[in-house]
Structure formats: C-alpha cells, structure tokens
C-alpha cells in the first residue's frame, strides 16, 4: 500500500493571508513527506523496528521532538544571523537508523548560508517564505543556480558544494531542508579551510594570496566569543 494514497489530490493553497504559523505548519508537513521520499541506503538497514538506548524500554515520548515549537511562535523574535535549527541524530536520538532528518533555515535580510557540503545525503530544500538565490557546483566545476520563491523546491545532490543567499536586503526568508540520512553531516567550506589549522603557507600558495590575506580570513572566521 502506498503510504500517501489517502492524501487529498486537490491542490492546497497557501496565500499571503495565511498566518505565518499556518504556513510553517504546512511547510513542515511537506518537508516530512519529502524526507520520507529521500530515505536511501545512506544509513545502514535496521534489523529491528528502531534503535533504542541499550537495555532500556522507551516510552512514546522517545519518538517525539518538540524543540521546533519556538519556530511556530509569532512572539519569538526572528534571528539576526542565518540560523539552522536541526532535528538530526544529535538532537533527536529516535532518528538513529531511520534515514531521515530535517532542518529549518532562517535567513535575515541579506544573509547567506555559506558554501558547504553534506557528505552523507542529498538535500531537498523547500522555501516557505521570501526568496532565495541558490546554487551548487558539480564535479566538472559547473555551477547551477536558480532563484526560488515561496513554494519552490530545489535539490542539492549528495556531497556537492552548495549555498543559499537571501538577496532581499529588507525581508527575511525561511526554508525547510529534508535529508535522506539521520546524520547527513555538514562541512562548511570557509570554516573548514580557514579555521582547521591548515598551514598558512599551504593556503597562501593554494589561493595565490599573501600570508597576511590568509591571516585576515582566519581572523574573520574565528568563532565569536
């Protein structure tokens, strides 16, 4: 039996009069279905129904995750910097082995989710509000870009470098990302290259830059105290 065969086939309309909470609720529903369809062999196949903590009987609450609730509260201020609120294995242990995870991405005006990769999963991005300029680079060094509006989806293939940019200098954007792994992993290109301790001479020669330029980049990317 198809798990979605009882879902209505008529279109669901979300317009500008719909409340932000209702729009996000609809978004999370769509993203959950997208996550189900993204599930692949990225995570090992289970030999049991689920993975519980060793030698423990788990209650129903083990399968519940409530830390997304503030995102639906209109009284909670929108973040001032790009923010990813994740529901992955690290935050939600019940996802272990289930080949699924989610992240809600909030983009204040003019902010970017810097170039990064997810080594263990593709990413299906669903824009719930605002617009985003997005792109990825394939293994032939070809760049694919698109401008997304609310209601659009975009797939970032597994392991490829990609980014998102809210080009609107006065409005926010929100998106939900679905992954086919409970632990997709994230490798931030700027932070990995310039804050992992790679020798500055290696970086300077690789980027055809001066040591001072490399030091400036390292300083700018250091975690804020």
Image (tube, rainbow, N blue to C red):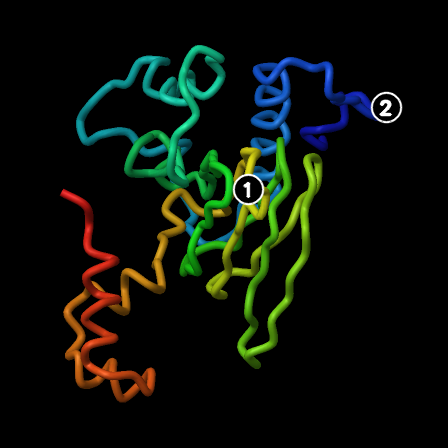
Question: Residue 4's image quarter?
Answer: top right
Question: Residue 116's image quarter?
Answer: bottom left
Q: x, y (%) of residue 104?
A: 47, 34
Quarter of the rendering occupied by the C terminus: top left
Q: Residue at x 50, y 60 (%)?
A: 162
Mark pair 1, 2: CA separation: 36 Å
Q: Residue at x 22, y 30 (%)?
A: 53
Number of labels in the image equals 2
Q: x, y (%) of residue 185?
A: 36, 52
Q: Residue at x 28, y 60 (%)?
A: 191
Residue, far right: 10
Tag 1 residue: 169
- Determine whether 138 is above or below 155 in the image: below
Quarter of the rendering occupied by the N terminus: top right
Q: Nearer the viewer, residue 75 or 33?
A: 75
Q: Is residue 198 left or right of residue 148?
A: left
Tag 2 residue: 10
Q: Are marks 1 and 2 in contact (CB under 8 Å)?
A: no
Which numbered disc covers residue 89?
Answer: none
- Determine whether 6 is above or below 32 in the image: above
Q: Nearer the viewer, residue 33 or 51?
A: 33
Q: Residues within 10 Å of mark 2 (few under 14, many from 20)?
A: few
Q: Is residue 97 left or right of residue 39?
A: left
Q: x, y (%) of residue 221?
A: 25, 57
């Amino acid at each position: 039996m198809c798990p979605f065969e009882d879902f209505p086939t008529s279109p669901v309309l979300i317009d500008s009069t719909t409340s932000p909470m209702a729009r996000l609720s609809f978004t999370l529903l769509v993203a959950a279905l997208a996550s189900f369809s993204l599930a692949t062999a990225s995570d090992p196949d289970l030999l049991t129904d689920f993975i519980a903590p060793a030698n423990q009987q788990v209650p129903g609450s083990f399968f519940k995750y409530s830390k997304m609730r503030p995102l639906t509260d209109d009284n909670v201020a929108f973040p001032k910097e790009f923010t990813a609120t994740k529901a992955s294995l690290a935050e939600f242990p019940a996802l272990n082995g289930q080949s699924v995870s989610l992240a809600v991405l909030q983009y204040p005006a003019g902010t970017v989710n810097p170039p990064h990769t997810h080594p263990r999963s593709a990413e299906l991005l669903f824009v719930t509000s605002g617009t985003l300029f997005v792109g990825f680079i394939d293994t032939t060094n070809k760049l694919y870009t698109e401008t997304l509006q609310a209601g659009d989806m975009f797939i970032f293939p597994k392991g490829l470098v990609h980014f998102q940019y809210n080009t609107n200098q006065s409005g926010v954007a929100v998106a939900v990302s679905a992954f086919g792994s409970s632990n997709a992993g994230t490798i931030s290109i700027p932070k990995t290259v310039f804050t992992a301790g790679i020798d500055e001479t290696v970086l300077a020669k690789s980027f055809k830059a001066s040591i001072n330029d490399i030091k400036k980049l390292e300083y700018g990317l250091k975690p804020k105290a």
